[in-house]
Image: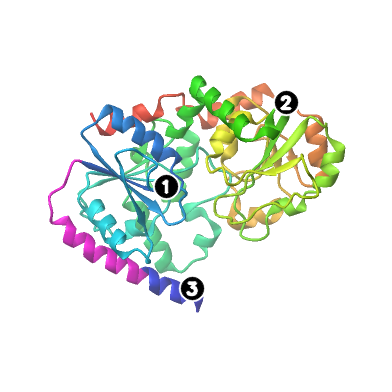
Amino acid sequence: MLKFIKEAAIKLYLLIFKLFYILFNFMLQQQKTIFVTSYANNSLFVIDTLKNQVPTEEIVILKDVNSSLKNNSVDDVKIYTFNNIKKPIEFIQSIYHLATSRIIFIDNYFEFISGIPVNKKQIIIQLGHAVGAIKTFGLEDTQVKSSKKSVRERIQFNYDQIDFTVIGSERMGELFMEAFNTTNEHLIRTGVPKTDFFFDELEMKRVKNQLEDTYSFLKNKKVILYAPTYHETKSPHLTIDFKKLKQSISDDYVIMIKHHPKLNTTFVADVLPEFVYDVSSHKNVNELLTVVDILITDYSSLPFEFALLNRPMIFYVPDLETYKQSPGLWEPLANNFPGPITKDTDELIWAINHISINQKALNDFNLRWNAYSIGNSSHNLIDVFYP
């Protein structure tokens, strides 16, 4: 019954969107670029470059209702909250900007794409929000595969509306072709914009100094970041015995926990003072990576960015067998990722105490996933679409 109600709501939403879109589409197309964003990081790098290289272009940001992006985050750029029924005027304004723009960048799956007519005037570019992928997505997600035919057809139509998808490697291109059921000519090999950060040594140093001023516990400590991906069920950090961890590793370490943005929760660490700190309120995880000595994660896309820093990582996957079934993995973790695979606290302790870098594995990993992300991705992208 809930699925039926959800589908009915989506169809009504798409109908309303399409009617307004067709109405506004009769107006003149403007020299305007739209960024529709959930995670913002990729978009912000492209926006900054676009403002510098094409100062005459009007830029509008449509942020998802759950986005942490503030309305005054970007100078001289209008920002609207998109897909919020509590703000109908902003919703209509958003459709107007979409219908009268030249180029639309998106960084996630958005239902409204299915409401744009096939004979659209715009170019739609999927920026994505991940450098690489461990868990399946798109048409290969097990939940999508088990959906009704009409749902799968709507999702496929959504993907068919995307003109180009930005990639940082041939491997990610292969995954997008499978997940979107698209073809090679729809891939743009410019590199992933947000990775430019890891090639800007001055900016990374500035951010690191700022973090050490903000979080005093970082000074003179080795830092472990634990950043699991989103889980439909309980958060996997509940399976780690942090008391045992504290007793079994060097006193030089502190642990930062960064929950996935979808989770509205905090880690209560009152019993572990000066050891575990919840930094989930810091939205830009790439900034946090500047102070991290060891990354612990699971099926997140974070390792693909962290690998650019040439530092060790550990995969903590107590639910590996069930996660293989749903949502599913593109390939086995073992032998394909540059760090030990652990499934319980004892294995995690051993991995931390014996941490090292397998340089060949890390180099191979970067070559496989970051081949095109070499510090100029944002400029490359602007050069393609704004000659």
Q: Regarding mark 1 in the picture, which secondary structure is present there?
A: loop
* Residue on which the image places disc 2: 220
Q: Could you give the CA–CA distance between mark 3 and mark 1, rounded to whole angstroms? A: 33 Å
* Amino acid type shown at disc 2: Asn
* Residue 354 is at least partly visible in this image: yes
Is residue 186 left or right of 329 when viewed as pictured? left
Q: Regarding mark 2 in the picture, which secondary structure is present there?
A: loop
Residue 56: x, y in percent?
20, 33
Position of residue 112 relative to residue 245, above or below, is below
* Amino acid type shown at disc 3: Lys
* Residue on which the image places disc 1: 70
Position of residue 284 relative to residue 384, above or below, is below
Part of the protein shown in magenta: 11-31
The quadrant in which residue 149 appears is bottom left
Is residue 333 left or right of 4 when viewed as pictured? right
The answer to whether residue 265 is magenta is no
The circle on residue 3 is: 3
Position of residue 138 relative to residue 55, above or below, is below
Q: Could you give the CA–CA distance between mark 2 and mark 3, rounded to whole angstroms? A: 52 Å
Residue positioned most to the bottom: 1
